[in-house]
Image (cartoon, helix red, strand yellow):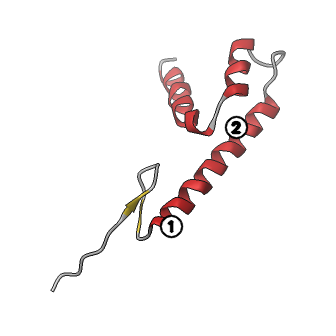
Amino acid sequence: MAEEFKLYKSDDGNWFYTKEEASKWDAKLKEGKQNVINKLRKLSSPDKVQQKFDSLIQELSPEEFDDFLVGIESVQKNN
């Protein structure tokens, strides 16, 4: 007889056996994105990069991070 079980999907599309595991993964992913954003903010300044780009980095949130990366990748592919 087949056994049924429920899977839980994290915000990035990974699957987990428990809701707690999915939530824990989401928290780690958000923390990792925030760490990268913090590093970018420390490296960026108006005298190093264009002022508009620096402003974008300074205002970037973890929720916007994936879209930001996709945008950077599309610029690189078009050059």
Q: Residue furthest top?
A: 51
Label at residue 73: none
Picture mark count? 2
Q: Residue at x 23, y 81 (%)?
A: 3
| Other-residue count near label 1 (Cα within 10 Å), few / some / many at <14 / 14–19 / ≥20 | some
Residues at circles 2 and 1 in contact by the CB criterion of under 8 Å: no
Residue bearing mark 2: 37
Direction front: furthest residue:
19
* Residue at horizontal 65 percent and vertical 49 percent from the top: 32
Residue 35 position, x and y percent, is: 71, 45
Amino acid identity at mark 2: Ile
**Residue 36, horizontal then vertical, whole percent:** 69, 42
**Residue drawn at the location 41% of the way across and 70% of the way down:** 17
First in sequence, mark 2 or 1: give its number: 1
Residue identified by numbered label 1: 21
Question: Which residue does the image show at 39% across and 62% down from the upper left?
Answer: 8
Q: Is residue 12 left or right of residue 62?
A: left
Farthest-out residue, right: 47
- Between residue 1 and residue 20, name the one nearer to us: 20
Q: Is residue 67 above or below residue 48?
A: below
Mark 2 vs mark 1, CA separation in Å = 24 Å
In the foreground, 79 or 36: 36
In this view, 69 is above or below 48: below
Q: Position of residue 54 (x, y in %)?
A: 73, 20
* Amino acid type of the residue that numbered disc 1 sits on in the rendered structure: Glu
Give SS at disc 2: helix
Q: Quadrant of residue 40?
A: top right
Local SS, label 1: helix
